[in-house]
Amino acid sequence: MEVGSLDRQRPWTHRLRPLLAGLALLLLLVWRLGPAERPGPEDPSRWLAGGMGPVPVQLRGQLLEDPRPSPAAAPGCRVLLETSGGRSELVFARCPPLHQGWVVRVSGALRRPPAAPHPLLAGGAERLARQATWSRLTVERLEVLERPATPIVALRRRIAERLIAAAGPERGGLLAALVLGSAVVPLPWELREDFRASGLSHALAASGFHLTVLLGAVLVLGRPLGRPLRLALAAGAILLFLLLAGPQASVVRAVVMGSVALLALEAGRRTRPLGLLILTVVLMLLLQPAWFHDLGFQLSVAATAGLVVTATPLEQAIAARLPAGRGGQGGCWRRHLAPALAVPVAATLWTLPLQLLHFGAVPLFAVPANLAAAPLLTPLTLAAMALALVALVLPAVVPALLLPVDPLARLLLAIAHGFAALPMAQWRTGRPLPLLVALFALGLLPLLLPGAARRWRRLGALLLILVAALHLGLLGADQLLLVHQGSAGGSRDLLIARHRGRAALISTRADPFSCQQVRQLATGLGVDRFDWQLLLDPVAPADPACWQRQGGLVVAYGEERPPLAAGQGLASPGLAVEALSMDSHALLLRLGRRAWLLLPDRQALQAWRDHPRPRPDGVWLGFRPGARERRRWQASAELPARVWLSGAPPGGERLPSSWSTSGASGSLLAYGG
């Protein structure tokens, strides 16, 4: 993309580079030197005394939010409780009628939230640590002590409830999110996923776009008034936006930048958007370093940087390359199409490294989806804001006013669902190593900065090719991944075998939670579909469609029969599994040129001993062998020395160096089969 000559762009580029370098340095310093939060001496986790629990306790505190339903695969409700010494997450079997700000006394079993068994999976410990919370209480008894008034929270809740009641969970939730942001609106999980898969999730998040729409409408209405009244109206709109959306990191950034830009505009002065962005980010991180790790904040800053730095030059480049209309009369459609393309492309490119780092998947149709949705967002956002006001004052009128708005909401939902349903809607690239993501961002930068010299763009392109080759090499390598998760309800094991980009799955459980974990792992590993899936759970899958959506053949228990009879197996190029006996789950997994013996339980071990086969290259034990079994194992000449063990190491004895354990919840990975 060439925009103007290098001579004209060079001074501006020279001013830009120090600003970007200074921002990167400040962010690095805040991240490395920012105070790491730790539980205080009076934090509820002190009752655990360094252990995992459970410990029966009683806590008293104030609710920090309304109870939120847990993900579909984990029924129940959860809510944060602020005590005098720290925070704890309350877990309920069913959602109780509680509200943010209420003071409660609860008793139950206190535990330390489990860490994620694998970096690609969402863990309770990591999620809660970002909210300065280090314990979780399963509530057995609840007592409401106080119900203090929370007018702002009640206002948000009333808007969301009335819009959802009038238009339904999807359309009403969409309209409420356009006003309040998805962080405070109970949206259906499928709706969130489809908006993310289509690249439209920014429409549901309170951001600078929504503030810009609100300010634009207020300034137009206040144009006949004098400057003091116009500024007072704008300030009121900004304050209202902040109160309704809440002090989220992305909202605070939008409010600060919007306020400064508005004052500069009214004063007749020009602002430097990039300098304003950097100053805003630095001040926010100095006041609250934890915001650095907030994903919404990261995406908001990156997208805004893309709009500030790249969108205008990209718009000019697109307009210059669009064909002219008949007789050269193409100015009108160029004027509208060029910015419509430049904005989503710039935002997508600048947020691409973060998409890869956090999700391992890229919305492939984000640009056309945004192009289709762009004409709807501004009128729909203004209409939603007007409906929110009417819902507070005259809720009975809302259904009638929804009639002209409903088609726009339906159309936006159809765009999101339609693009999310397309093949390859999410390009599962797999989550690259953080170092590769950093190199990718470094290589992408010269291609995004206007006026960058050709040699820097060539070096950037070469670096991108190198990063892609390294990442594809890692994805294509033969590997076996074990993910073990222990819990009070029993343990679960997932084995994912990969050969030259293909993948197969063996799971000891077939419940919805295991399926959800497999989906997360597949996305992070860059697996678009499994060749086959073998489910060893004697209980048939409660949601067979969940497993079938992950592709390939799904083999599970049926009519009290095991998935595979002795000698039966599943096979695809480079990946095969064979059942070794009729009365156990003993399996032989072939991965490329290697063979692994899979023994989920003691019955499988006995079956292997009764029907010996050629010595495999490795073995997995899904149970903890006793001391006598381990000695017999080590003395056997038929069994391999390389052993994987699910669970924590057996106490009292040291394991041989060739044995590896996953821990209570953890993972093991072997390359080359």
Image (cartoon, rainbow, N blue to C red):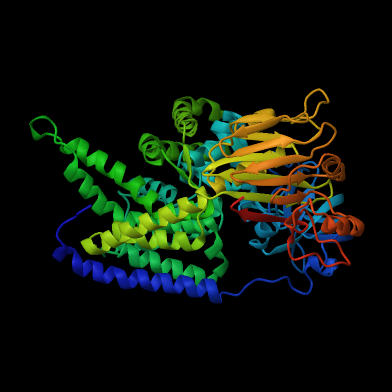
Residue positioned 39% across, 64% down in the render: 277
Q: Is residue 470 above or below residue 334?
A: below
- Residue 68 visible in rendering: no
Residue drawn at the location 80% of the way across and 54% of the way down: 637
- Tell me residue 176's x, y (percent): 54, 40
Q: Nearer the viewer, residue 589 or 442?
A: 589
**Residue 248: percent from left, percent from top:** 55, 57
Given the current orientation, which residue lies at the most extreme right position? Answer: 628
Viewer-proximal residue, 538 or 298?
538
- Placement of 18 over or under 449, stated as above or below: below
Residue 453 against residue 205 in the figure, above or below: below
**Farthest residue, direction top:** 559
Give the image quarter of residue 83.
bottom right
The percent position of residue 249, horizontal first and vertical second, equals 52, 59
> Which residue is found at the position 60% from the left and 50% from the top?
479
Look at 78% across and 65% down and name the residue there. 656
Relative placement, left or right, of 455 versus 128 is left
**Left or right of 451 in this view: 161:** right
Question: Which residue is nearer to you in this view: 58 or 155?
Answer: 58
Residue 553 percent coordinates (x, y): 63, 29
Q: Is residue 540 depicted above or below 38 in this figure?
A: above
Numbered circles on residues, count: 0
Left or right: residue 648 versus residue 381 is: right
The answer, for residue 343, to whether it is visible in the render is yes
Answer with left or right where residue 626 lies relative to residue 643: right
- Is residue 660 or residue 237 the one in the foreground? 660
Q: Splitting the image into 4 quarters, where does residue 238 fall?
A: bottom left
